[in-house]
Image: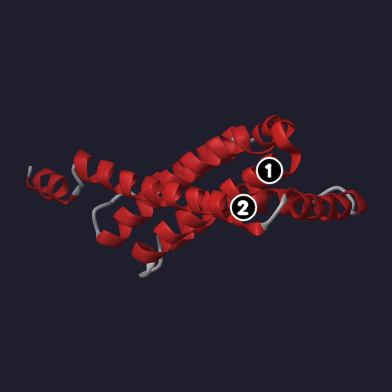
């Protein structure tokens, strides 16, 4: 009976979890807005088309990407959020990581749309859509776990591993 009372005292309330998640979502939106603004400030369509052409020529010249490269592209943000959960500076680093994820996704999608015009919208959706939808949610919830772990409000270590496993399973 005493163990249950002590355990219930240390679990965060649903409202504090929601506020933390809203806090992380705010950082994601901030990064996304900054990514879109930077795309507009970089220059005209010609410069972005040159950047995309250079990237495409590098990709076609190389062989098929290895499994480790694909794994790194898909899971760099969820894995970093998971690893930051074990660091003492996670309270500052996790929101920055979430903002960087928002920035990189928004910058890449905006660059495609700006350089290719309306034809870039389906390309951006097919390139980043489903994969990002899954990994963003997983990164947000793993980041939520990391913030809870650092502040001492979480006693379940396997929760992040389950989220990371779900992220891995869904993105196949």
**Residue at mark 2:** 39
Image quadrant where one finds the N terminus: top left
On residue 86, the disc is none
Is 59 on the left or on the right of 36, as rendered? right
Please, which residue is most extreme toward the front here?
A: 44
Whole-Å distance between the Cαs marked 2 and 1?
Answer: 8 Å
Is 81 on the left or on the right of 110, as rendered? left
Identify the residue at image location x=84%, y=51%: 53
Is 76 on the left or on the right of 51, as rendered? left
Q: Position of residue 69 (x, y in %)?
A: 73, 53
Q: Position of residue 112 (x, y in %)?
A: 70, 43
**Residue at mark 1:** 114
Q: Is residue 157 visible?
A: no
Snapshot quadrant of residue 121: top right
Identify the residue at image location x=30%, y=54%: 148
Question: Disc 2, disc 1: CB below 8 Å?
Answer: yes
Q: Secondary structure at mark 2?
A: helix
Snapshot quadrant of residue 22: top left
Local packing at callout 2 (Cα closer than 10 Å; few below 14, some 14-19, many 20+) is many
Q: Position of residue 155 (x, y in %)?
A: 28, 51
Image quadrant where one finds the C terminus: top right
Identify the residue at image location x=50%, y=48%: 32
In the rendered structure, which disc, 2 or 1, sits on the residue that comes first in sequence? 2
Q: Is residue 99 visible?
A: yes
Observer-nearest of 65 and 33: 33
Please, which residue is most extreme toward the right here?
A: 61
Q: Position of residue 16 (x, y in %)?
A: 22, 46
Observer-nearest of 1 and 28: 28
Q: Secondary structure at mark 1?
A: helix
Local packing at callout 1 (Cα closer than 10 Å; few below 14, some 14-19, many 20+) is many
């Amino acid at each position: 009976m005493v163990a249950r009372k002590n355990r219930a005292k240390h679990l965060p309330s649903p409202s504090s979890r929601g506020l933390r998640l809203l806090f992380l979502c705010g950082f994601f939106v901030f990064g996304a807005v900054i990514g879109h603004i930077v795309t507009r400030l970089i220059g005209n369509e010609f410069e972005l088309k040159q950047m995309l052409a250079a990237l495409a020529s590098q990709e076609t010249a190389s062989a098929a990407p290895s499994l480790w490269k694909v794994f790194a592209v898909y899971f760099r943000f969820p894995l970093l959020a998971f690893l930051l959960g074990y660091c003492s500076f996670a309270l500052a680093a996790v929101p920055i990581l979430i903002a960087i994820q928002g920035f990189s996704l928004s910058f890449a999608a905006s660059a495609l749309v700006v350089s290719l015009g309306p034809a870039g919208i389906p390309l951006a959706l097919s390139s980043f859509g489903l994969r990002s939808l899954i990994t963003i949610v997983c990164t947000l919830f793993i980041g939520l776990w990391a913030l809870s772990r650092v502040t001492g409000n979480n006693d379940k270590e396997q929760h992040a591993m389950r989220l990371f496993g779900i992220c891995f399973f869904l993105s196949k």
